[in-house]
Image: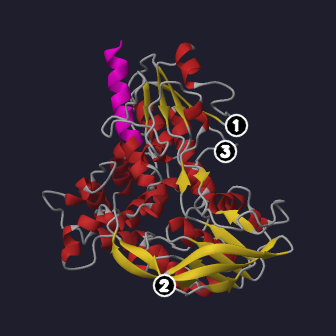
Amino acid sequence: MREQPPAVRIRNFEEVALGYSEVEAAEEAARCLQCRNAPCVQGCPVGIDIPAFIRAVAARDVAQAISVIKVSNALPAVCGRVCPQETQCQGVCTLGKRFEPVGIGRLERFCADWESEHEACCAPMAPDTGKRVAVIGAGPAGLTAAGELRKRGHDVTVFELLHVAGGVLMYGIPEFRLPKAIVKREIDGLCRMGVRIRVNEVIGRVTTVGEMLAKGFDAVFIGTGAGLPQFLGIPGESLNGIYSANEFLTRTNLMRAYRFPEYDTPLRLGRRVVTVGGGNVAMDSARTALRLGAEESIIVYRRSEDELPARREEVHHAKEEGVQLRLLTNPVALLGERGRVSSVRCLRMELGESDESGRRRPVPVPSSEFDIDADTVVIAVGNGPHPLVLQTTPGLELNRWGNIVADQKTGATSLCGVYAGGDIVTGAATVIEAMGAGKRAASAIDAFLRDSH
């Protein structure tokens, strides 16, 4: 797929990938073998009929293709851009055993973008049931659950903490990977179906899960995500110039820091930005720093490149744009001058035996301390569950990490009529995994509501 050249794109926040033309999409779709057993469908967390939609693209019937997709996926423009297809549908593509797999995600993106330029396709909806469902959190899990429940005829209201819906899609993923207008377009589609979204609703303060059930909602889905940033627990983390990745990306993506002074959210990063972590969020932060004017953007990660949890595509793009990778390097302290961070003290690491994650455990090299100068440091080492709803819902079972304990197949929690899915259950995972959880929970909620008459 065509892309902006690296030297051009690091000076703007426009989308890196430019998408397929209709001719390119049809040519790519024609590569599909139309396997009888369709392993790609098994690899898709939301179960899209991939051969059927690709067959329609190959025949240049894009309207049919997007209608097939929307039976299973309410957010195709999002998934086509940020899903890790290489480990899911494309990872099991039969063609990929000997050649490059079919570009399933790129074709899904093409169909969704085609739809935005033509008449929108609404999934068929069942007659109204008279049942009311509250969805807490307007991120990928909550939006998917809301769409699926509305299709089944239920009255759905989504309650969102922030002033816009979208969750991590809006505050966490940079504009150059997922334009906010595209997220808004997908959400507008849910609203046209009849989903109501109420923003600035801090559940746990304005009301609670228990009060929702007592005041007329027949079921509740909790999809509040993993929005509590984690830190390193090393000296110096309270210095000025140190951000959690959550704050850094939220100020950039949702509050438009990159358009200062039009939007009054300045981020004065200085010459050199160091990002700690190796996941997609770390790559997003490091690439964002360059676009905000940093001369150098460095990622510090304690394992080798083979263990980087970020998508290969994101690592490739980061390298193309000039992000430096300091691998087998572990921060042990943040040093400052006059109250502001000035350097990161690190230890060199080497890989030892495998740990519980299956990756080789990093071990410090004795007497290997060194400093990396830094004007700004971004900590991107993970997030924990958002605690507010959990603290105000008595009887809700949590695990030792503070996540909700829920049935993997249904999302059912320890409370009758209360379901949960996404990062609040699994810990930080992918957008499509959260959507899959929202879809499974919606099916279970529908069955629960129909059984309870």
The residue under label 3 is 164
In the rendered structure, the answer to whether residue 55 lies left or right of residue 113 reads: left
First in residue order: circle 1 vs circle 3:
3
Residue 413, given in percent of the width and then of the height, sits at 40, 30
| Residue 292 visible within the image | no
- Check disc 3 and give the amino acid type: Val
Measured in 3D between alpha carbons, the distance from the residue under mark 3 to the one under mark 2, in whole angstroms, is 47 Å
- The residue that label 1 is drawn on is 200
The disc, 3 or 2, on the residue closer to the chain's N-terminal end is: 3
Residue 368 tag number: none
Q: Residues within 10 Å of mark 3 (few under 14, many from 20)?
A: some
**Residue 127 position by quadrant:** top left
Range covered by the magenta-colored residues: 438-453
Gap in Å between the C-alphas at discs 2 and 1? 49 Å
Question: For the residue labelled by badge 3, is the local secondary structure a helix, a strand or a loop?
Answer: loop
Residue 48 percent across, percent down from the top left:
31, 50
Query: Circle 2 sits on which residue?
Result: 365
Q: Residue at x 45, y 42 (%)?
A: 144
Task: Report whether residue 372 is seen.
Answer: yes
